[in-house]
Image: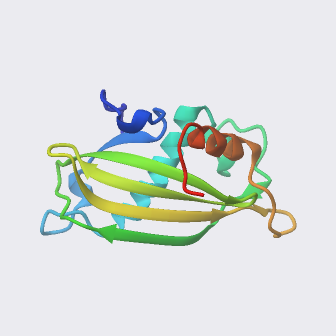
Amino acid sequence: MSSVPQGRSNNQPNWLELNRCVRFGDTDAAGVMHFHQLLRWCHEAWEESLQRYGVAAAAVFPGGRGSEGEPTIALPVIHCEADFLKPVHGGDELIVKLEPERLDPGRFELRSTFLLKQPETIVARGLIRHLAIDIASKRRCHLPESVDRWLEASGLGQLREL
């Protein structure tokens, strides 16, 4: 993934709209995106979004280089889904729009919409839901502060249905 498109739509913060180029290794023998890539791209988009917002990977994911300590909260995936609307080919330039939503103090989900840049057409959608658990006790807990701040900032200025 790379820089943000010049004309971001809906005034989305730059950490919620990303670019992705479909690489040869992302495709199958027919030259279209292999199905499992979509959920990987959803997770990578979340990682890049956190980084752009200012959250270091080591603060969220265990095993990061240069981390002063391991995170005490894990964020396992508890649900995921993907919809493939049009073929995605090697070389396609995509826009990835992220829509995070806090579900409760210890759960959130991230919807990802993948659009072909030219013409701007939705080609796929993905959703990944995470649950916060305390690593030591293996019990549910509140989201890490850094993720909570990212969720709060991501929702500012967006109208939501009541």
Q: Is residue 53 left or right of residue 75?
A: left
Q: Nearer the viewer, residue 12 or 28?
A: 12
Find residue 158 and report its horizontal and vertical position in percent.
53, 42
Q: Residue furthest top?
A: 6
| Residue 63 image offset from top left, x and y in percent | 66, 49
Horizontal relation, residue 72 to residue 43: left or right: right
* Front in this rendered view, residue 21 or 140: 140
Vertical placement of 100 versus 14: above or below? Answer: below
Q: Residue at x 30, y 27 (%)?
A: 6
Residue 135 at x, y percent in the picture: 80, 62
Tell me which corner region of the image, top left, top right, bottom left or bottom right, holds residue 3: top left
Please report the residue visible at 79 percent of the width from the left and 56 percent of the height from the top.
142
Residue 69 image offset from top left, x and y in percent: 78, 43
Color style of the picture: rainbow
- Give the residue at the far front of this rendering: 162
Give the position of the C terminus as an image quadrant. bottom right
Count the labels in the image: 0
**Relative side of 160 to 61, left or right:** left
Q: Is 15 in front, or is 155?
A: 155
In the figure, 58 relative to 32: above or below?
above
Q: From the viewer's side, name the closer residue of 80 and 21.
A: 80
- Residue occupying image coordinates x 42% and y 55%: 112
Quarter of the image containing the N terminus? top left
Q: Residue furthest right?
A: 137
Q: Quadrant of residue 108?
A: bottom right
